[in-house]
Amino acid sequence: MKVVALFRVSTGHQADSALGLEAQRQDVEALCAREGLELVATHTEAGVSGRMSLEAREGLMTALADVSLHEAGGLVVAGLDRVSRDPLVLMMVEKVLASKGARLISAKGEGTASDDPSQILMRRILSAVAENEAMMISVRTKAALRAKKARGEITGRPPMGFDLVEGKLVPNADFHLIEKILKMRNRKVTLREISQIMETFAPGRSWSDVKVHRIVKRWGSLRSFRRQFPKT
């Protein structure tokens, strides 16, 4: 039987390391070898959340299209949570596959051996567990971010001109660019003029009125900026 494979990791770190993707690939290839399945196409979603809607899942949608294109009998994944952590999306994928005369196949089993009522029940239970796990991860992540903010630590990606070191902003080689922008704004130079000047002063950084406005809005006046980061 011909099959199409889908691999997915949800974080950029997993995508960069390729460890998660490689493990999934090995599991799927082992299943195909064991069951005599012919892998005719593969699709990878790197840094894609399993809680995204079906229409936002480009890799998944293309994989489903390939099932039709190759007249495949199934879509193979390392685990059901690689398809989605949303039970509704998972059921929609199953319905789409069924309309093509195909089915969803998990390398872990997970109730995908057939459409026997007991197998369907197992799939639904495991899908609900995956959804709950995703929600718990979200709750823990938000709690950790709140705790960091309460300790005065910076979360997320550091702004231009700074590196994030142990939760604190540390000026880097681009620090002087922020000062230059705030100095010009202090002299009432317009946002458009500032962006044009910065294009010449520091080319290759995609300067725009919006980017300059974002920098000015974040730091306010030059005086307040220097209070936070005294000139050395």
Image: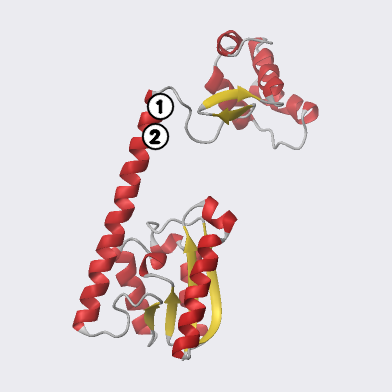
Around disc 1, counting alpha carbons within 10 Å, would you say few (fewer than 14), some (14 to 19), or many (20 or more)? few
Q: Position of residue 75 (x, y in %)?
A: 43, 79
Q: Is residue 84 left or right of residue 197?
A: left
Q: Is residue 148 left or right of residue 119?
A: right
| Residue at the image point whose x is 71% and y is 36% from the top | 205
Residue lying farthest right? 200
Say which element carries label 2. helix
Which quarter of the figure is the C terminus placed in? Answer: top right
Q: In this figure, what is the number of numbered marks? A: 2
| Residue at the image point whose x is 39% and y is 85% from the top | 102
From what the image shows, is residue 14 above or below residue 39? above
Q: Position of residue 85 (x, y in %)?
A: 34, 61
Marks 2 and 1: in contact by CB < 8 Å?
yes
From what the image shows, is residue 90 above or below residue 145? below
Around disc 2, counting alpha carbons within 10 Å, would you say few (fewer than 14), some (14 to 19), or many (20 or more)? some
Q: Position of residue 183 (x, y in %)?
A: 68, 13
Let me know if residue 44 appears in the view.
no
| Residue at the image point whose x is 76% and y is 31% from the top | 199
Q: Is residue 200 left or right of residue 156?
A: right
Query: To which residue does mark 1 refer?
Result: 149
Q: Position of residue 171 (x, y in %)?
A: 64, 22
Q: Amino acid at mark 2?
A: Leu
Q: CA distance from mark 1 to mark 2?
A: 6 Å
Query: To which residue does mark 2 refer?
Result: 145
